[in-house]
Image (cartoon, grey):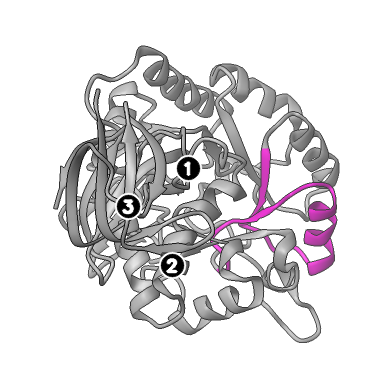
């Protein structure tokens, strides 16, 4: 490895946007940001901007592969493919399925991580179990045959299969025992998210009091805001700096005005952009499956064949970042933050990814001034050029 300095128009640092200057990269990790030209190789990105690699903490698949394939090869396909979207760290995400299927999915991720991958690939920072602890009314594209009440016995079984990689699990707060489960899961080191739920605001708040901290794709799959019963959306909007809200900003799942309301209510630093991308991401329109459910991909959406409900998305993170800026609901710095540092902090992985800090892996993206992706770097090496 070598030492070089990046020259660019702007650098999105943890607490500010630095204009001009140089960012040191030393043996694959970030060094200091400096204003004077250092005596080393200069990689000149004049006219470009440098941001942390994006962190996608809710993604099911890409390039025709799905985590629920329960195959290490599928995990490899996703990990390699999402570099094209500027994603350098992620949480492979499961769906509601049988206990045995989820064990197999967790085991396949662990197998991939432990075997290593010689090809450039986004770093797996843990597993997100999206289900099966959901309820019927807002199940969305989750298979109702496998919905069940939360238990630590099941979580521990999946954690064993994952060799400790389970980082986050979602639960519907209206289940009896959801509050105790939340407390126990958090105590075990797992982030608890709330979603796919008809819970009242009070039920959601009780789980937040017990340690839950994330709302799964806010607005989607949850009880809405009403002036007499604020519901899950009300709980999300009213907890400002006490919780994080995921948002799918593809223009189909959430109206741009509604996205802006969440950002205004919570502050951009407590909004995590996600893709919720399914296997058809990066693929042509056509027929696919989300878990066991048949899906039609057309006109920018993935929808269940039976009923037409949205079934995940085909959103690329690089496009979600650009969308929120183009919609006028976030500045460039806020858009970048919501795709990097905010999701890392929401999921307790900010110690290893999500920001440009000395000593961290030099995972970053090169952007045009309009936030279109130019290049992705991993460990100081260019791994994708648009």
Between disc 3 and disc 1, whose residue precedes?
3
Where the N terminus falls, by quadrant? Answer: top left
The residue that appears at 24% across and 38% down in the rendered structure is 39
25 with respect to 368 (left or right): right
**Magenta region includes residue 310:** no
Query: 193 above or below 1?
Result: below
Q: Where in the figure is residue 137, as x and y percent of width and height?
A: 63, 62
Numbered disc in front, either 3 or 1:
3
- Residue identifier under label 2: 333
Q: Nearer the viewer, residue 221 or 211?
A: 211
The residue that appears at 46% across and 32% down in the rendered structure is 359
Q: Where in the figure is residue 366, as x and y percent of width and height?
A: 25, 54
Between disc 2 and disc 1, whose residue precedes?
2
Q: Nearer the viewer, residue 87 or 18?
A: 18
The quarter of the displayed image where residue 302 is located = bottom left
**How packed is label 2: few (under 14 Cα within 10 Å), some, or many (20 or more)?**
some
116 with respect to 77 (left or right): right
Q: In what element is the residue under mark 3?
A: loop
Q: In what element is the residue under mark 1?
A: loop
- Residue identifier under label 3: 36
Q: In what element is the residue under mark 2?
A: helix
The reply to whether residue 308 is in sight is yes
Q: Tell me which segment is drawn in magenta.
A: 191-219
Between disc 3 and disc 2, whose residue precedes?
3
The quarter of the displayed image where residue 19 is located = bottom left
Q: What is the CA distance from the residue labelled 3 to the residue labelled 2? A: 23 Å
Query: 317 above or below 63?
Result: below
Numbered disc in front, either 2 or 1:
1
């Amino acid at each position: 490895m070598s030492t070089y300095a990046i020259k660019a128009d702007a650098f999105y640092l943890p607490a500010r946007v630095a204009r001009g200057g140089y960012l040191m990269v030393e043996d694959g990790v970030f060094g200091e940001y400096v204003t004077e030209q250092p005596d080393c190789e200069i990689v000149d990105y004049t006219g470009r901007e440098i941001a942390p690699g994006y962190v996608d903490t809710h993604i099911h698949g890409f390039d025709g592969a799905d985590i629920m394939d329960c195959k290490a090869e599928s995990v490899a396909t996703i990990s390699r493919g999402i570099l094209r979207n500027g994603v350098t760290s992620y949480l492979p995400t499961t769906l509601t399925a049988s206990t045995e299927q989820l064990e197999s999915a967790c085991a396949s991720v662990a197998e991939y991580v432990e075997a290593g991958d010689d090809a450039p690939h986004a770093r797996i920072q843990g597993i997100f179990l999206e289900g099966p602890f959901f309820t019927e009314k807002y199940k969305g594209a989750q298979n109702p045959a496998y919905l069940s009440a939360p238990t630590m016995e099941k979580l521990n079984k999946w954690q064993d299969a994952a060799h400790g990689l389970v980082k986050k699990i979602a639960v519907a707060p209206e289940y009896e025992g959801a509050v105790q489960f939340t407390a126990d899961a958090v105590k075990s080191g797992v982030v608890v998210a709330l979603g796919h739920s008809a819970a009242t605001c009070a039920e959601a708040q009780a789980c937040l009091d017990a340690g839950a901290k994330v709302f799964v794709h806010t607005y989607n799959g949850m009880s809405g805001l009403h002036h007499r019963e604020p519901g899950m959306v009300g709980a999300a909007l009213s907890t400002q700096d006490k919780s994080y809200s995921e948002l799918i900003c593809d223009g189909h799942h959430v109206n741009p005005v509604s996205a802006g309301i969440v950002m205004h209510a919570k502050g951009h630093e407590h909004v995590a952009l996600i893709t919720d991308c399914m296997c058809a991401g990066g693929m042509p329109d056509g027929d696919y499956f989300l878990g066991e459910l048949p899906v039609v991909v057309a006109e920018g959406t993935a929808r269940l064949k039976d009923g037409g409900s949205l079934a995940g998305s085909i959103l690329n993170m690089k496009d979600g970042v650009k969308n929120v800026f183009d919609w006028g609901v976030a500045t460039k710095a806020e858009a970048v933050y919501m795709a990097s540092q905010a999701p890392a902090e929401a999921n307790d992985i900010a110690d290893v990814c999500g920001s440009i800090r000395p000593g961290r892996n030099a995972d970053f993206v090169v952007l045009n001034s309009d936030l279109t992706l130019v290049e992705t770097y991993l460990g100081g090496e260019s791994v994708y050029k648009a």
